[in-house]
Image: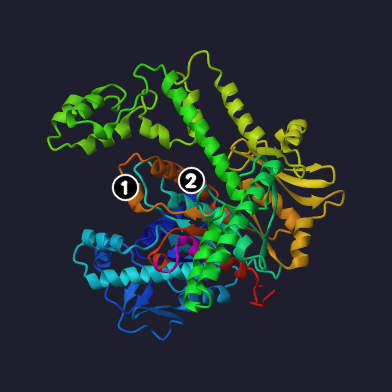
Amino acid sequence: MNFIITLTGPSGCGKSTIIERIMELEKKLGGQGIKFMPIRVPKYVTRPLRSNEIKDLLEGNEVDVMSVDHIPETCELKYQTYGKKYGVGLDTIISHLNNGKSPVIVINDVRVVEELKKEFPGHVLSLFLFREVPRREAFLKEAKERGNVAETETDERFNKATAIYRTYIENIGLFNRVILNPTRTAGSEDYAQIQIENVIKGILNGKISLKDKRNGKPKLFIIAGNAASGKDEIIQAVNDMGKLQATIIPKYTSRMQDEDDGSEMICQYVPKMSLMKEYEDNYMAELQRQEIVFQEREAAVGKDIEKLADVRADILKERRAILKPDKQFWMALKKEKEKLRKNIRKRILREAASEYFLENLDLFEKSLTQLCEIYKKEGYHKKGVNVDEYLCSQPDIDEQTIINLIEEEADVEYDICLDKLNRLNDKQLWKLYEKDGYHSTNTDVEACKEAYERMILNNFFEYNNAYIDLEKINEERKDEIAQKTKGQIFKVTGPAYYIEVEDKGLVMYENNKTLYGFEVSKLPEKVGFQYQQMLNQNKHCVLVASLVDIFDICKPYFDNNVITVFSYSEISSEEFGKKSSAGTVEKKMENFENEIKKYSEYIADFDHVTIYAESEFDKRNGGRTEELIDQIFRLFRFYSTDDKNNLL
């Protein structure tokens, strides 16, 4: 099979590199017995060749543009950006297709991509290339590194990149796949190369279809991605603003309810009703007391309209500030959990019996000499480092540099300062406490942990009668489940499975030792009742589930009307370049690497990507959440039409 490949993306996203990777696939796939013959299709452009393009030509390399004074009349596909005209001839593309080749074209105009898809239905792979959102400072830095680049040209390239990024958001449904080409650390793989190879293979082996998936029927959107990638914001937006367009599939979960959980989460344990009644009474009593005060303040200003307006504005703020029952509950729970965290910290500091002990280092209170002495201790520097030699070779070293070195290199098995200890969350604290040397030899850490959890559970939660006992199902059907999940990769493709219980068909899965399940069919007919509801209401449905095998498990129960979305949270080049050991950056980078690797390997399973990042445009227009919401609602709208653009 041969097809057209279009590449769209801003300057600096790696288009030239991706083209090289595509061209290399002919030989690589040929060695695997897969026929694929890509060929570059250069565009005509009414601008002079850039210095890097001239250099490529002189070195015998191909470029994707031909500089001309006027675009030839034979070019049916034309577009213009910032005064420069571009053109491609259909005859060239058709000739390559007839010869069994796959034309590769860089096109930064969605109208041309649409025209190609209309002219060659089911034979166009449209790719959007993304590295990071355009930032002017990054363009200025790049221009400086290139040399001899005028500031006007830099501004033009930045403005063009911003426009292309907005074009993606506004036309997100148009692109078959997104190649995520992030800034890489030294140890990172070439994720873009992995992605492009898996996309091409996906088309050639039939995993990816280039046919338009719009068929006039509602879709199940499955949102996947790591924590803080925008999944929760999408769910919140659907609940708040998108009820006419989509509904949320409710999920059962074996954990306690969280503050951020909406009605879509059916948790095993929910806030204790007696406690909520107490908070409700407190709220109503406080509200009644304040209402008397509010009435007196309104009466005091009489008929003075301006003063009355000011008073009512203040009253509105104060009324909203009165803690509602649910807020009182979560605040009380938060305080209780902080008490328990303090208790664990005290235990760690009191019981730790490692060679160097845990101590409050107070690094910022130490002199340069004292900091150097701390750094010299084994455990505070990387193994194999000659500390004295290193310090002697750094005459300009200062206190902050030493502090950074200690925090970066200190082996947590030997030491951790109190400041770091205070930043650890519950899970991290328990993980540290479980390690040998951080608890007394006669302490049963697991029993201690269970006692803390039981205390929280007994004081704040009660069993939810609407919950389906997932643990019981998991235990009683473990042999059947083991067969169903055989070969799945934990936390990537599984464990995920369809299982029938009484009158329900459930899709169940496990994530971070917590079970989840959602109902997809009614027995004994195995009717896909969720999909039937979608048809009856003429609405899309949204499900958050990151395990790849769930996608295919769901398809039979939604008549294959499943759209998969990877929720991507960008890490900027600045974050990659940080030398700090700040926990949030380190954790974010670790999660980022894991998720981008998963996406790269399973890109064929993801139809679309939502990008959760703050652009220059965003900063002026309300923040990155609004831009994320814009993307998901544009996807809803895209699939609310059929391939003839008729509204549902």
- Residue 632 in sight in this render: no
- Quarter holding residue 215: bottom right
The amino acid type found where label 1 is placed reads Gly
Foreground: 119 or 398? 398
Q: Is residue 255 above or below residue 91?
A: above
Which residue is farthest top?
A: 442
Which residue is farthest bottom?
A: 73
Query: Residue at coordinates 49% horizontally, 13% vertically from top-left?
Result: 441
Q: Does the magenta stretch include residue 624?
A: yes
**Residue 396 at what x, y percent from top left?**
13, 38
In the image, 167: left or right of 81?
right
Q: Give the range drawn in magenta.
A: 620-629
- Give the mark, 2 or 1, whose residue is nearer the N terminus: 1
Foreground: 532 or 549? 532
The amino acid type found where label 2 is placed reads Lys
Mark carried by residue 577: 1
Q: Mark 2 points at which residue?
A: 597
- Quarter holding residue 163: bottom left
Query: Residue at coordinates 40% horizontally, 65% vertically from top-left?
Result: 619
Query: Residue at coordinates 77% horizontally, 61% vertically from top-left?
Result: 533
Query: Residue at coordinates 39% horizontally, 24% vertically from top-left?
Result: 413
* Nearer the camera: disc 2 or disc 1: 1
Q: Is residue 399 magenta?
A: no
Q: Is residue 221 above or below residue 66?
A: above
